[in-house]
């Protein structure tokens, strides 16, 4: 990936994430999040993971955040904006987060030896296309986790209906 | 890392030439597209007029042929009204997103063998991703206008688009399985051995796609987000002048885009029963016009759905049908 | 096909079977009006799964899943807690007015998740099993939709659980980045081969794992959710999740910390010692202040997580076996105590306050006697099963050289006697203030009989159970 592109994307992702968290207007916050997801999708593209990039936009930007907007838009924005954005403990939270971040940098900087490499080099993925490589792995080596994930989704559907349906028999 | 070395690395000229070619292609496509959009409005009014035993526009030019241009001039010089309580940045951005989503999706459609702006591996997914973004234009317009009519239109639209997107994506999975690729050029080439394209083996998928396409473009019988009799004009009630025109254009671009996807994925793309010399995109255009006519025909014929009917159609009929289509396609492919 | 069937599908037969039963229950709910039938089907499913456990052996799905004695022992614990909780549920749900079939389906799904966790031999499987279990239990905690407390419990559990999952994922991704594999055996051998034991990244990952699993087993300082959730959730679910997810958390701790990060035993055992002492201290001391019996049992369950951690800290086969024993015993005695709470919940009476138990021995002598047994067992007084469990745990810890820690644990047990025996004191030494009714539920009575018998039988004849646990871990970590 071109380091210039990476630099821009990384900076944009950080800035838009920060904006998404700090906006008082929840609709604006979600819109910044969408912009952030777009940059993330481009990041995937830069890493030759084009399938993930498309899915990132279809699933996150196209479906999940639409539902978020749906919910947020029926809020009373004026009321939301008049309240305090953060609880009074935020300086503590930020310093804690910064501390953990520093700790992570100190612990992981220069001491992160690369683990063993699999058979999928960028060249192999490019020749086989990312979608195909991902698909064939998912349905052979990772079939068990894949099926488990489908069970999780089923539980989520049942749970959502149980908790939210207007009237159960 | 030397930044300048990175910018001016060898091969920069190649890069510029490539970019230039893409830009030229994009300009051509956008130009032709806008021309089509302009006259699609005229075509609609004329054909619906004749279906309802009226004449349609007749005053401007012979048979009203200059009507679209007159409309454009009128809209361009109209006052641009912005509601006082509107959320201005979002209000401004919304129509742009609507147009952008439709136009970007068209960039991966092959118009004839070898002519496509961006020949990418995940073409079909890209189209789905971009069409899902179209919803944002509508929702943002509805919310930022700070008007009840707009807002209801926006809410209806978000629910509708998200629901039908699933059915549409699933209906295209059959095509992906038949072609073994997501690249739209490969999909068209895979259809060459079928006399009717993927229309025949994927008739069920085509039906689901067609219904979902009507819903995605907010056309009758699924035009609830902009139902005049209930919501004035729906999500763009508060828009006027050029911004209104942008939404209008976006709707037609959406229609053309959906038609192009249907043609590329189900009807054999640029191929036809026999080759037409010198005009490689002739069949594509003919199919496109038929499709656009279908949109108008349905509008003049079918009454609007009620909202709960719309939702139950999407979730309880189309999605199961699309899933059935995938299962059958998979079984046929394995056996 | 038959080859695949034998080597792959047979290994996950119990999980598949239970998932099929879960889906069947959800579907049958549409046609069956009498929900007790669904409870019956769930129990039949659990029985069938128990039977199928004996036919599973070995790895499956590219080392994603392993059926070994260790996993099967834990699956037994989960099935026991599932059956007992289902027995309690039918009447209780009718009383609360939420007797829907999805309840049993979700319970079965949660058990599938736990079983996958116990048998996971890959970090991805660990995570997915954990999510399957957690999601089901979040919904179950909020199952009484019209009760604000139940909804609050679900929301709190969900928020903190999602947080814990994030920690787990971060730990997994760090491990993957370092070793290039997610297989538990693969991580262990890679770390051994490349001598990465003191790598700071790995230490960070270890901390993240301990935090994530600490949440799941409700160890202090990651216990904040437990009292509110245990109090708000439907009582049978409280019984279920005080045992099942906790045991599943321990099962995964065994797999991840003992096997994958076996070379990091100094680091994680240091962390776990802190967790264990804090859990025992905070759990037992805060339980004294509680007046609601569900909250009291919640704090007691925090303390019991602290005891069970001793078995992990010992880092020996003996410690592991005693931890497994303890969790099984804990399942019987804790669900037994919750059964008493459930059975006293009737249409007009909540019976969750300690003062409600005044003079229970006069009105319901048998129930009071059983509660006495459970309280003795939770304290660890012979001849009950709780004593046996603690005895083996402490022995294992002493043998591993943690005498001082054992002394702390014994002291904490002595403190716990105060609040457990206070319940007994209320029941036997006070005059009845309120007229309590027992719910007319044969299931709950049967569960009471089962747990009471189990606690006494294991307490008097522990040899069979001890041998079973020892036999179960012979092929552990291979």
Image (cartoon, coloured by chain):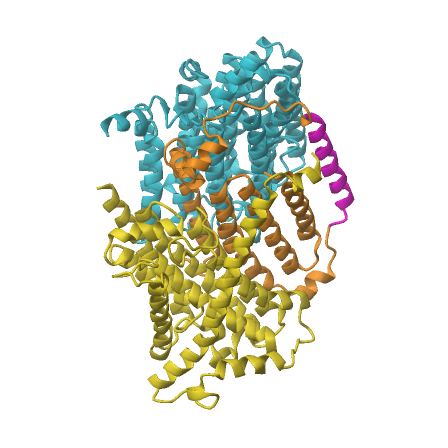
Chain colours: A orange, B yellow, C cyan
C96 is higher (above) or lower (below) than C173: below
The one nearer the camera, A43 or C451, is A43
Residue A67, how many percent across, how many down?
53, 57
B230 lies above or below C80: below
Q: Quadrant of the N terminus of chain C?
A: top left
Does the segment drawn in magenta span residue A96? Answer: yes
Q: How many marks?
A: 0
Write the start and end of the magenta stretch as one range. Answer: A87-107
Which one is in front, A55 or B25? B25
**Left or right side of C414 for B293:** left
Residue C72, x across and y down, in percent = 39, 24
> Splitting the image into 4 quarters, where does residue A80 fall?
bottom right
Residue nearest the viewer, comparing C268 with B303: B303
Res C301 seen here: no
- What predominant SS class does the magenta segment belong to? helix
- Which is nearer the eye, B334 or C60? B334
Magenta stretch contains residue C148? no
Give the quarter of the image for residue A43: top right
Q: Is residue B282 visible?
A: yes
Q: Looking at the picture, how far across and down is residue C294, in whole percent? A: 56, 39
Residue at the extreme left: B335
Residue extending furthest toward the front:
B278
Image quarter where the C terminus of chain C lies is top left
Residue that appears at 44% across and 14% down? C470
In percent of the image, x 28 and y 60: which residue is there? B275
Q: Position of residue B129 (x, y in %)?
A: 48, 54
- Relative to A128, does residue C7 appear above or below in the rendering? above
């Amino acid at each position: 990936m071109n380091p210039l592109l990476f630099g821009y994307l990384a900076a944009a992702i950080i800035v838009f994430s920060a904006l998404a968290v700090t906006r008082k207007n929840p609709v604006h916050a979600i819109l910044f999040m969408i912009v952030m997801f777009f940059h993330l999708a481009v990041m995937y593209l830069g890493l030759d993971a084009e399938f993930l990039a498309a899915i990132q936009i279809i699933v996150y930007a196209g479906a999940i955040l639409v539902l978020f907007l749906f919910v947020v838009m029926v809020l009373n924005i004026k009321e939301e904006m008049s309240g305090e954005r953060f609880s009074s403990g935020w300086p503590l939270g930020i310093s804690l987060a910064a501390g953990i971040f520093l700790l992570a940098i100190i612990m992981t900087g220069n001491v992160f030896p690369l683990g063993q490499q699999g058979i999928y080099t960028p060249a192999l993925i490019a020749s086989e296309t990312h979608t195909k490589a991902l698909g064939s792995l998912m349905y052979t080596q990772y079939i068990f986790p894949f099926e488990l994930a489908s069970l999780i989704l089923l539980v989520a559907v049942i749970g959502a209906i149980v908790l939210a349906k207007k009237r159960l028999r | 890392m030397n930044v300048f070395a990175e910018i001016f690395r060898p091969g920069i000229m190649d890069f510029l030439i490539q970019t230039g070619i893409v830009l030229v292609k994009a300009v051509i496509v956008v130009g032709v597209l806008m021309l089509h959009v302009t006259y699609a409005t005229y075509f609609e009014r004329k054909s619906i007029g004749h279906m309802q035993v009226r004449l349609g526009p007749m005053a401007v030019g012979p048979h009203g042929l200059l009507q679209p241009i007159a409309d454009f001039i009128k809209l361009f010089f109209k006052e641009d009204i912005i509601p006082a309580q509107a959320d201005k940045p979002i209000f401004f951005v919304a129509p742009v997103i609507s147009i952008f989503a439709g136009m970007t999706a068209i960039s991966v459609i092959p118009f004839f063998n070898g002519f496509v702006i961006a020949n990418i591996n995940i073409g079909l997914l890209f189209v789905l991703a971009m069409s899902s973004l179209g919803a944002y234009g509508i929702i943002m317009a509805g919310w930022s206008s700070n008007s009840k009519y707009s807002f209801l239109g926006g809410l209806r639209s978000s629910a509708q688009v998200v629901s039908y997107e699933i059915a549409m994506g699933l209906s295209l999975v059959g095509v992906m399985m038949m072609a073994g690729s997501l690249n739209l050029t490969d999909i068209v080439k895979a259809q060459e051995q079928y006399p009717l394209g993927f229309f025949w083996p994927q008739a069920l998928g085509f039906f689901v796609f067609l219904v979902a396409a009507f819903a995605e473009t907010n056309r009758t019988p699924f035009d609830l987000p902009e139902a005049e009799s209930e919501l004035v004009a729906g999500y763009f009630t508060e828009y006027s002048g050029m911004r209104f025109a942008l939404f209008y254009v976006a709707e037609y671009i959406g229609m053309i885009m959906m038609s192009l996807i249907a043609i590329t994925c189900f009807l054999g793309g640029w191929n036809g029963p026999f080759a037409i010399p010198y005009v490689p995109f002739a069949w594509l255009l003919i199919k496109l016009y038929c499709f656009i006519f279908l949109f108008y025909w349905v509008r003049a014929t079918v009454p609007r759905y009620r909202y709960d009917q719309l939702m139950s159609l999407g979730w309880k009929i189309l999605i199961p049908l699309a899933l059935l289509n995938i299962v059958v396609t998979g079984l046929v492919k394995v056996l | 096909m038959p080859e695949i069937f034998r080597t792959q599908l047979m290994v996950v037969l119990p999980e598949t079977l239970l998932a099929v039963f879960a889906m069947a229950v959800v579907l049958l709910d549409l046609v069956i009006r009498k929900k007790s039938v669904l409870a019956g089907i769930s129990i039949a499913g659990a029985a069938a799964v128990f039977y199928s456990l004996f036919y599973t052996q070995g790895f499956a799905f590219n080392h994603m899943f392993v059926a070994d004695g260790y996993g099967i022992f834990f699956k037994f614990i989960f099935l026991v807690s599932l059956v007992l909780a289902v027995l309690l549920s039918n009447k209780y749900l009718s009383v609360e007015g939420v007797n829907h079939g999805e309840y049993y389906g979700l319970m079965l799904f949660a058990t599938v998740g736990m079983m996958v966790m116990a048998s996971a031999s890959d970090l991805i499987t660990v995570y997915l099993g954990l999510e399957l279990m957690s999601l089901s239990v979040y919904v179950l905690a909020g199952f009484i939709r019209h009760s604000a407390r139940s909804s609050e419990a679900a929301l709190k559990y969900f928020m903190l659980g999602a947080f814990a999952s994030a920690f787990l994922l971060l730990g997994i991704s760090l491990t993957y980045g370092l070793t290039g594999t997610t297989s538990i055996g693969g991580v262990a051998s890679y770390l051994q081969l490349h001598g990465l034991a003191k790598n700071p990244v790995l230490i960070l990952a270890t901390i993240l794992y301990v935090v994530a699993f600490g949440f799941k087993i409700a160890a202090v300082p990651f216990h904040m959710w437990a009292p509110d959730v245990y109090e708000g959730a439907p009582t049978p679910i409280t019984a279920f999740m005080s045992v099942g997810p906790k045991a599943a958390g321990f099962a995964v701790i065994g797999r991840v910390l003992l096997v994958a990060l076996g070379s990091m035993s100094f680091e994680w055992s240091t962390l776990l010692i802190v967790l264990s002492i804090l859990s025992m201290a905070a759990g037992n001391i805060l339980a004294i202040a509680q007046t609601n019996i569900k909250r009291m049992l919640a704090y007691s369950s925090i303390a019991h997580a602290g005891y069970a951690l001793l078995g992990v800290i010992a880092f020996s086969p003996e410690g592991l076996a005693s931890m497994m024993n303890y969790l099984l015993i804990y399942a019987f005695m804790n669900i037994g105590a919750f059964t008493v709470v459930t059975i006293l919940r009737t249409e007009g009476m909540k019976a969750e306050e300690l003062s409600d138990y005044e003079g229970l021995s006069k009105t319901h002598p048998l129930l009071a006697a059983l509660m006495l047994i459970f309280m003795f067992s939770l304290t660890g007084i012979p001849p009950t099963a709780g004593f046996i469990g603690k005895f083996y745990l402490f022995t294992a810890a002493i043998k591993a050289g943690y005498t001082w820690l054992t002394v702390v644990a014994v002291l904490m047990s002595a403190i716990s006697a105060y609040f457990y025996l206070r319940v007994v004191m209320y029941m036997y030494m006070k005059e009845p203030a309120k007229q309590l009714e027992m719910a007319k539920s044969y299931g709950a009575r049967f569960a009471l009989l089962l747990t009471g018998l189990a606690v006494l039988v294991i307490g008097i004849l522990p040899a069979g159970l001890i041998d079973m646990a020892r036999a179960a871990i012979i092929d552990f970590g291979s």
